[in-house]
Image: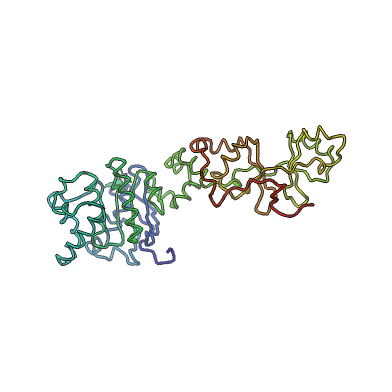
Amino acid sequence: MKEEDPILVYKDIAKIYRGGNVAVEHINLTIHKGDFVCLIGTSGSGKTTTMRMINRMLEPTSGEILYNGQDIHKTDPVTLRRHIGYVIQNIGLMPHMTIYENITLVPKLLKWPEEKKREKAKELIKLVELPEEFLDRYPSELSGGQQQRIGVVRALAANQDLILMDEPFGALDPITRESLQELVKNLQEKMGKTVVFVTHDMDEALKLATDIVVMDGGHIIQNATPKELLSHPANKFVEDLIGSERLIQARADVTTVGQIMLKNPVSITPGRSLAEAIRLMRQRRVDTLLVTDDDGYLKGFIDIESLDNRYNKATSVSDILNTHIFYVTDDVLLRDTVDRILKRGLKYVPVVDAAGKLQGIVTRAALVDVVYDTIWGDSDDTDSETSDEPVIKNLDTDAPNDKEA
Ligand SMILES: Nc1ncnc2c1ncn2[C@@H]1O[C@H](COP(=O)(O)OP(=O)(O)OP(=O)(O)O)[C@@H](O)[C@H]1O
Ligand SMILES: [Mg+2]
């Protein structure tokens, strides 16, 4: 989809008010057809200003905006607005017009015949699951949520490709807001619309957006997909905006075992003597050693107990090698792994790459640090059928490779 020409391009846009009051500055942004772009930021950060320049409700002080490749400055504002749907903050239905008249406002401007307008209105009211009789009512005869639904479909009435929404659901109760969010998302996906949506609400942005544009002090701080934003917030401001709770949740969702493992675990090869093993344990202050072959493939472990028990009979690491070892691969998501590791009560788990080479270890302490909250939230293990099942196997019966020495 992204190979297409963009529908909207901001080129170094600034809006500076009298007295040098900078509303926005250095706004560079490219929006493609079918994108759902959420502008999010604190109050006064420039979201509305950024949006209103799209349909020339505000004129930039400098820079250029291209709509379908055309400089909007050279397009008649009225024509432009007929092509761009707009849902203003808190509904914006005309109180003296019926719902029908409200919905067909732009089609009327476009001089559609009566028949076509009527048909469109019926189609749209059905789309938002309101009865056809409502077309003859006035906005005040509808509830706030119903009015908002009309506001949303009105923006769709003239088949505009680009729809601007400035905090459309801000004043609604959570349940109505949620159903409208679903409505908008569905319509946008089904009808292939492009949406630019201003919000204060990070949950709303994460739910709706394909691209989240974080603004602060008139600047774009970060422009990323929800997933990227959660996994790589650009700075402390973005982190705070996302909130620590969501970050903790998200970290388990996007973080792989490889990202949190401790690298360079203490390991030994099977040919070494037990005296060497003891020396290494003492030196590194550990009571178990992972055992790998010369090429670094994980073979098992030895621990201080078996070393102690069999010291007299055994001479090399291979004599007391325990191959019953659980491990995970570095590419599995923490989310899918954590419960299992913790439930086994292991102090640490070795991490191997896809070929079975030892990469590191994940300690219980590190896991608890990262995902403590998430784990206890849903420790009921119902998702064990998922395809990216973590690899926790026994080297004895299920070796990851055949490099047995
Ligand atoms: N007509 C104006 N004259 C001077 N300054 C203005 C004017 N309109 C807006 N501003 C300033 O521009 C900045 C950005 O305003 P804007 O309305 O874009 O913010 P916003 O991010 O939409 O905020 P909110 O979340 O409160 O709606 C603010 O500092 C605001 O005070
Ligand atoms: Mg605003």
Task: Report whether residue 79 is seen.
Answer: yes
* Res 119 quadrant in image: bottom left
Q: How many numbered marks does the figure carry?
A: 0
Instruction: Please indicate whether residue 367 sits to the left or right of residue 201 in the image.
Output: right
Q: Residue 44: image x %, image y %?
A: 33, 44
Q: Residue 335: image x %, image y %?
A: 53, 44
Q: Quarter holding the N terminus?
A: bottom left
Instruction: Look at the image and name its color scheme.
Output: rainbow
Q: Which residue corresponds to the image point at 44% horizontal and 66% vertical from the top-left?
A: 3
Q: Foreground residue, 128 or 296? A: 128
Q: Which residue corresponds to the image point at 36% horizontal and 58% vertical from the top-left?
A: 189
Q: Residue 261: image x %, image y %?
A: 62, 43
Instruction: Please indicate whether residue 9 sits to the left or right of residue 55 in the image.
Output: right
Q: Residue 188: image x %, image y %?
A: 33, 57
Q: Which residue corresponds to the image point at 14% horizontal and 50% vertical from the top-left?
A: 137
Above/below status of 150 relative to 176: below
Above/below status of 339 relative to 207: above
Task: Report whether residue 19 is seen.
Answer: no
